Amino acid sequence: MLEIKPRPALPAQGLTIAEAAGRTGVSVHTLRYYERAGLVVTPVDRTPGGRRRYHRRDLEWIDLCTRLRATGMPIRTIRRYAELVTAGPGNEPDRLALLESHRTEVAARLAELRSH
């Protein structure tokens, strides 16, 4: 039976980079890299002292990026997808085409692996 566990609530002020790393399962270095590489769709919130604070939307987006990378999507393609999302409504067909193209590539790789 599938059990869905509720996600722990986030503090209103958000999470530190170390806490976000723990929640997402990626390293602090990876979180900084995702931000530098243009993969994050919203600017990461900062404290008055300049420290990063991650909120639910940030964590969900990082989770998506991590899953796309796990399927073999190149960083440049994730960046393009992030650019489309950041641009806002009106480009949904482009987003869908990007994801469908990747799905086709993943399916072809799976078929090749099965044949071996």
Image (cartoon, rainbow, N blue to C red):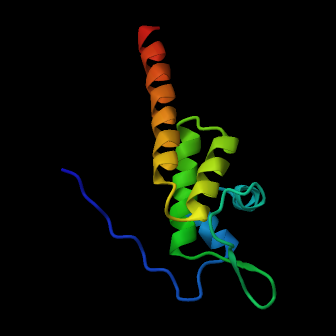
| Residue 43 sits above or below residue 90 on the image | below
Q: Can residue 25 be seen here?
A: no
Identify which residue is drawn at 25% across, 57% down: 3
| Residue 14 sits above or below residue 67 on the image | below
- Number of marks present in the image shown: 0
Front residue of 26 and 102: 102
Front residue of 15 and 46: 46
Image coordinates of residue 101 in percent, x first then y, are 50, 33
Front residue of 5 and 55: 55
Horizontal relation, residue 10 to residue 22: left or right = left
Q: Can residue 58 be seen here?
A: yes
Identify which residue is drawn at 59% across, 38% down: 73
Front residue of 66 and 82: 82
Q: Quadrant of residue 18?
A: bottom right
Q: Can you name the residue that lies furthest to the front here?
A: 90
Image coordinates of residue 113 in percent, x first then y, are 47, 16
Q: Can you name the residue that lies furthest to the left here?
A: 1
| Residue 98 sits above or below residue 7 on the image | above
Horizontal relation, residue 19 to residue 97: left or right = right
Q: Quadrant of residue 50?
A: bottom right
Q: Can you name the residue that lies furthest to the right here?
A: 49
Image coordinates of residue 29 in percent, x first then y, are 75, 58
Q: Can you name the residue that lies furthest to the bottom here?
A: 48
Identify which residue is drawn at 47% across, 8% down: 116
Identify which residue is drawn at 70% across, 43% down: 76
| Residue 15 sits above or below residue 13 on the image | above
Image coordinates of residue 105 in percent, x first then y, are 51, 27
